[in-house]
Amino acid sequence: MPHHKEASLYTTYFDRYQRFRAVADLLSGLERAPNGLLILDVGGFDGEFAKFLPGDRVRPWGELIRPENGPLPFKDGSFDVVVALDVLEHVIPEERPFFLAETARVASRALVLSFPVHEASEVEEFVLGLTGNPWLAEHRIFGLPRPADVEAVLDTLGLDHTRHPNASQASWMAMHFMMHRLREDLKEKVSEFFNRRYFELENREPAYRAIYFCTPARG
């Protein structure tokens, strides 16, 4: 079972903690073998998400998933779970269906996606204009995914899916301004305070991010 409430995890940067903790909570409902779940963490460049699921086997995958690169080098259903947390918004819109199809193909039990939603574009633009955040600048290039478009692809792939709000827009905006140009040690202190006290209150609409928990459709 996850141990995501350990004190050391509260210092995770607030924006990452919000999605990592929420997804770990969702995955806690899956039955596990003695050696845990086998999880492919698409976009998990530093292995930080694995700390939220210490009883599972989490494999980071940092390679780009694009049609020109061909399919993922794994057989169908190679992993119990595939997670792609705040990755889809960095994928070219025309290639998002391929990305979703490949991540779903190699997941046998669940695909979990998180991404900032198109409805949060205005607040992102406001934060970007005052902070120059480079990650948000890339979001502007590709555009934030529209949930209806993502759901249409998931339906085509034969996946049942539930949508969960993550990170209220107001708090997300205020926290980014607070963190801007703050020393790293102070960012940890602010994140710890925020994560410990307010995480449970933040998964509400209007949300900055949506989390989709997807499973094979029942026949």
Image: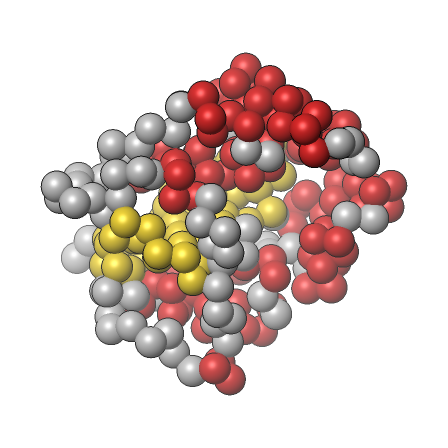
135 vs 126, nearest the viewer: 135
Which residue occupies the extreme front position in the image?
185
Q: Position of residue 130 (x, y in %)?
A: 87, 41
Q: Position of residue 21 (x, y in %)?
A: 44, 33
Q: Position of residue 182 (x, y in %)?
A: 77, 31
Left or right, residue 28 beside residue 141: left
Q: Is residue 67 above or below residue 50?
A: below
| Residue 190 in sight from this viewpoint | yes
Coloring scheme of the render?
Answer: secondary structure
The quadrant of the image that shows the C terminus is bottom left
| Residue drawn at the location 23% of the way across and 64% of the way down | 77
- Residue 72 is drawn in which quadrant? bottom left
Which residue occupies the extreme right position in the image?
130
| Residue drawn at the location 54% of the way across and 73% of the way down | 95
Which residue occupies the extreme left position in the image?
34
- Residue 71 is drawn in which quadrant? bottom left
Q: Position of residue 191 (x, y in %)?
A: 61, 26
Q: How many marks?
A: 0
115 vs 193, nearest the viewer: 193
- Residue 90 is drawn in which quadrant? bottom right
| Residue drawn at the location 33% of the way across and 38% of the way down | 53
| Residue 153 in sight from this viewpoint | no
| Residue drawn at the location 54% of the way across and 15% of the way down | 197
Q: Is residue 18 above or below residue 57?
A: above
The quadrant of the image that shows the N terminus is top left
Left or right, residue 166 beside residue 47: right
70 vs 201, nearest the viewer: 70
